[in-house]
Image: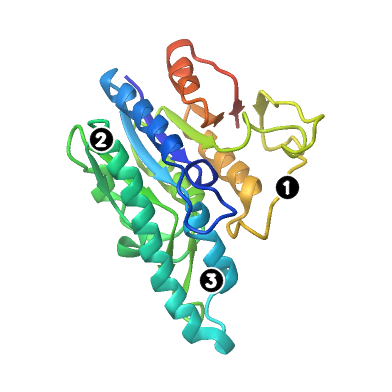
Amino acid sequence: MAHILIKFGGGLITTKSKMKTVDREAISKLSRLVRELSRLGHKVTLVHGAGSFGHLKAKEWKIADGALESIIEQQKDAVISIREDMLELNREVCNSLANHNVDTQSFPPSDWANEVGADFSGDLSPILNCSEGVVPITFGDVVDCSKPKLFGILSGDDLMVRMGKEIPGITHCIFLLGDTEGLLSAPPANPNATLIPIWNKNQQVSGEHDKTQDVTGGIFLKLESASIISKIVPHVWFIDGRKPDRVLELLTTGTTRGTQIVP
């Protein structure tokens, strides 16, 4: 049986442009997927993004830049607020999974992680040692950093790298996207964009990073993270999260419509 590390993209489970707008229908579809994977005997570990529960407020108060003397008090309030918002989003995901008879245990990074980037500090052993039959879940969050930064944003993509490297036995690492079938030859809004079925780091990509909404690097960070993971995990994929059955197809047949990331 497979051990699947899955990321629910923030743009998949929320409307990224509208403050704290959750997409319950999308989350319910994903919950059904996790239930089916578990029923088939696969082990699942989950990460989810922040979407409009994190990025918009973080952008407004420049949280990714760390402590700025001119607005430090407002930033401190924003850090508390974003962490509360992320717990709220995580509850939405966990409650949906519970409604589909999936037991979960959450690990908010602000409780156990420090610093940012894929080499952040934090002990993964509680996630590794989660009880049998329980799906561990963590998410992008604002974490404490050493001075002078004081705080920063730990991306779900960076969590995926550490977890892909350190959780033994991961067979599949799947990034579920909210607005595209996989990696495209041009930004999704371009009518001439076509799906790239296989990608490695030597291939150039024409991407788009919406800095008005995304504070963690967008598609470029995802590709960098997936490329690192592909050196360790046999099957790394970008798949359309609006069509979760493609994950089941991948596990059944070894392939599906999406982008496979290879070393």
Mark 3–mark 2 distance (CA, rounded to whole Å): 34 Å
If you read the primary sequence from the N terminus, does the residue marked by circle 2 or circle 1 appear first? 2
If you read the primary sequence from the N terminus, does the residue marked by circle 3 or circle 2 appear first? 3
- Give amino acid for label 2: Asn
Q: Secondary structure at mark 1?
A: loop
Query: Mark 1, residues whose alpha carbon is within 10 Å: few (<14), some, or many (≥20)?
Result: some
Say which residue appears at 80% left-offset and 31% top-offset.
191
Image quarter (top left, top right, bottom left or bottom right) of the C terminus: top right
Q: Which mark is residue 208?
A: 1
Q: Which residue is the site of mark 2?
A: 99
Image quarter (top left, top right, bottom left or bottom right) of the N terminus: top left
Q: Residue furthest bottom?
A: 70
| Image position of 213 (left or right of 173) | right
- Give amino acid for label 1: Glu
For this rendering, which residue is in front, 244 or 45? 244
Query: Mark 2, residues whose alpha carbon is within 10 Å: few (<14), some, or many (≥20)?
Result: few
Which of the 4 image quarters holds residue 203?
top right
Numbered disc in front, either 3 or 2 = 2
Residue 57 picture location, percent across and down: 53, 67
